[in-house]
Amino acid sequence: MTEKVSDPLIHALLQGKFNQANELGITMTIHPDSQLEYEFSEKKQDAILTALGNVIENAFDAVKTKVESERKVSIFFTDLGDDCIFEIDDAGIGVPQENMSRIFQQGFSTKRGFNRGTGLALTKFVLNEAGGDIVLEEGELGGACFVIIIPKD
């Protein structure tokens, strides 16, 4: 990963999530063509760290109840072009069509319990504040694929 991510904080976050995945019995892979050499402003770096932390944690939640051979999360990132793009794909059940329009709303959650529905809303907010965005696509692993887009300065 050291060869793929030059930003020390983003590298540390990804390394920490990789270790957490191992502890949970989740296979987390980073696409071999991934590359991130761009130096972000502090605001954009903070937005990316918040977004990646929340989205990867959600991906872990989506797969942790599956049998171990199906607990998969894949990450791809690139800084080629005008934007930096991160894709987090999981092998969970995905987001039902009826929830697609509400998934980034404050207070909305597909999880049970109290004090839910803040992670994706916060993620969308901080990315928008930094000029970026997050979108949800159908994943290649069968679950959800969140795409984080942040423009270069």
Image: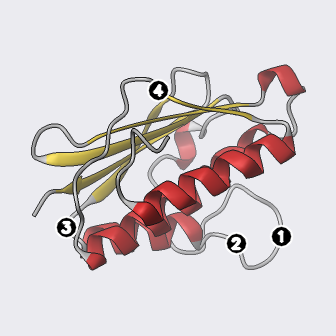
Q: How far is mark 2 from mark 3, CA to CA?
A: 25 Å
Residue 39, position as x, y percentages in the image: 23, 61
Residue 149, position as x, y percentages in the image: 28, 51
The amino acid marked with disc number 3 is Gly
Nearest-to-viewer mark from 2 and 3: 3
Residue wearing tag 2: 116
Comes first in the chain, label 4 or label 1: 4
The amino acid marked with disc number 1 is Gly
Q: Is residue 60 left or right of residue 75?
A: right
Residue wearing tag 4: 31
Comes first in the chain, label 4 or label 2: 4
Comes first in the chain, label 4 or label 3: 4
Q: How far is mark 4 from mark 1, CA to CA?
A: 34 Å
| Vertical relation: 110 (above or below) 140 | below
99, 4: nearer the viewer: 4
Identify the mark at residue 113; answer none if there is no mark: 1
Quadrant assignment, res 72: top right
